[in-house]
Every structure is written in C-alpha cells, then in structure tokens.
Amino acid sequence: MAQFVIVGAGQAGCSLAAKLRSEGFTGKIVMIGEEPVIPYQRPPLSKKYLLGEMQEDQLYLRPQRFYEENNIDLRVGKRVSQIDRSSKTVSVDSKKINYDQLAITTGSYARKLPAQIGGELGNVFTVRTLADMNAMSKCFAQGARVLVVGGGYIGLEAAAVAAKKGMQVALVEMAERILQRVASKETADFFRKLHTSHGVEIKEGVGVSVLKGEDVVRSAVLSDGTELEADFVVVGVGIDPVTELAENAGLQIENGIWTDELGRTTDPSIWAAGDCASFEFRGRRIRLESVPHAVEHAECVAKNMLGGNEAYLAHPWFWSDQYDVKLQIAGLHHGYDMVVTQLGRREGSMSFWYYHKNELVAVDAINDPKAYMTGRRIIESQDKP
C-alpha cells in the first residue's frame, strides 16, 4: 500500500490531505507538524482571536475526528529533521518514516528584529502562530503602550486591534510609506487616514535603531533619534519561506522551493505547495502568501500526486479587516503604471483599479464587494491557461 507523507500541518497540508482522500486515495497518509496543535486558520489570529471574539477550537480547520475518520495519521509537535531522498525516508525523533511520495507544505516564518538591537527582549512579539498570539494577548490591555514595527497588512491589523482595545498605539514603517510593497499610494493614503482617525500615531521613513530594557522591552529608540516608551512591541516586517529542510535535501531553491507547473520539485517524488513553494506566473517566478493560494495550490498538487496532469493557474486574491473596513484585493499590482479611483454606491466605499498598459492587473476594493467581484472576473478572464 502506498504511503504519502506531508511535512507541514498548516492550511496547505490540511487541504492536501483532505483532497487526497476526496479524490479516492486509499493508501496511508502521514501528516507531520511542528506546532503542538491540529491545523488551524491563521488570518483570524491577528483579528477576532486577539480581540477575544473567537475561541481556539473555532480556529481549527477540521475537528480532530476528521483525521481519525479519514485515516490520516496526524502527528503534531513533531519536527522532521531530514529528508533522505535515496532511501525515500524522513527522520522524526531519530525514527525514519518511509514515503512513496512526499509533499512539503512547511509554510513560512515571521521575520524578527535582530538580537543585537533588542529583538530577543521579553514582550517583543511576532504575529504568526497561535503561540505568538497567546503570548501577546496578556499585554493587550486598555491604556497599554504598544509599538508596531512594520506598516504592511499584518502590522496595520495588529494596530487596529490594539486601538480598538483602547491602547496607545504607535506604528513605524522604515519605507517611505505604509503598504509600499503591496499597494498603491492611494490605498496607503486611505489606511493612513483611517488609522490616525482612531488615534494611531504613524511614523513613515523611520526604523527602529534599538529596543531598550533589562529583561523586557521598555522603550524604542528610532532612527530619527526619537525615543518611545513601550510596554510591548509587535513586529510585522514580513515572512520568509521555510526551505531549510528542502535545501538540505538538495532540492532547488529559488524564491522558495522551486516547483514546476504541476507543483513538483526537482525530485519527481517530492512536491511542494503553499507559502514555501515558488512557481511561474506570467513569465516570472513568484510565491503567494495567502489562504486561497494555499488551498488551491495544495488541491492541485494532490490531484497531480495521484497521476493527474493539471497545471496550476493562480488567481491571486487577498483580504484584510481593519476596524469596520473590509479590504478585498484581486490580482497582483506589480508593474502597474496607472491607478483609477472609483467611488462605490455605499457611503465610504471605494476601489482602486491598477492598470499596466491599459490591462487591468489588480483591484483594491474597500467596503465594495461588487467592485471586487467585477475586477476579479475581468482579471481572471485575461489569464490564459
């Protein structure tokens, strides 16, 4: 009986295992995850979970019984230390597990501030895992002073939660403006105004020189010389793919684990899906960091592990919730040369349409689901399989 092993028990790993079963695979499935908890959703962590509006068991992608009923051998709190391609085994706790086919869905990890500037002081948190949120939640109290480092969507979402809880919030972004890597000036201007209206102090073009404190952080000295007192710090400066295991196994790494259009790595028995994998998209190699991609990529890979020949065609879409604003994003804004602003029918709704040589490449829709769906249909109709 064939045995498939999945390394990584997040959104992609869970989706892949479920798809293998729904596609009729009757062999053995072993799924191994480092975190000591069954697969769960990450997006609500920095929003509803941190606000106390969602309990831990509501985060779970599937209940525990799903894995038992579908004969999925889920092993949590376990780390795969090595892939031996010659013997087709993975090593866990000095034991070897055989595989006929292997899927790597190890996801990504949050970047940290360097230890030499105080990044390892107490009460300095990243926003990635359930453990991160549980550690951070004790600091989320009315009147507390928080410094958010990073003006991307993760940092802005954390700032919104802190402001809603009545905290004193300062956010610093090293780039010229917030959302510089992921959105237009128009979108950034909207969210800057939204946050400042809720009392968030935003400093752009400013980084952190050093965090000060004995055991726990007490203040931050910024690159402009300003010193801000802080009871805790939230670091949201991006994520990197988890590729060490694949790299040590000799697989090709190129902006993540290199995969072909089927999701296969440079080893025909090893596949990769989700945040950790890179693939061709419109003539360049990219990674996508989103739940929809993790699900769709993993499900495509599952079919191909079972003998399919389905090329993965990405349709990027994302979302962010801040205060009473829902931002929905279709497409990728890279390379745009024009942005068109449209006001929505409802008060406060609007959308920003990104074009490259008169071709729509992305839409940022703010409280405007109709604009989002329209933009998404147009963008997807332009893609050729």
Image (cartoon, rainbow, N blue to C red):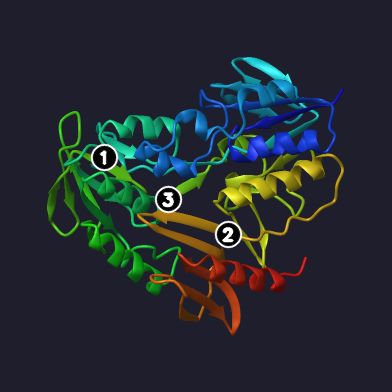
Which disc, if any, is residue 116? 1
Depth-wise, is mark 2 or mark 1 nearer the camera?
Answer: 2
For label 2, the crowd category at 10 Å Cα-Cα, with few meaning under 14, some 14 to 19 and many 20 or more, is many
Cβ atoms under marks 2 and 3 closer than 8 Å: no
Q: How far is the residue under mark 2 from the one under mark 3?
A: 18 Å
Q: How far is the residue under mark 2 from the one under mark 1?
A: 37 Å
Which disc, if any, is residue 317? 2
Asked if residue 63 is positioned above or below residue 329 in the image, the reply reads above
Q: Position of residue 310 (x, y in %)?
A: 81, 53
Q: Is residue 178 visible?
A: yes
Asked if residue 294 is positioned above or below residue 362 in the image, the reply reads above
Q: Secondary structure at mark 2?
A: strand
Identity of the residue drawn at 64% across and 71% down: 379
Quarter occupied by the C terminus: bottom right
Residue position for label 3: 238
Q: Is residue 277 visible?
A: no
Q: Amino acid at mark 1?
A: Gln
Q: Earlier in the sequence, mark 2 or mark 3?
A: 3
- Side of 362 where 160 appears, left or right: left
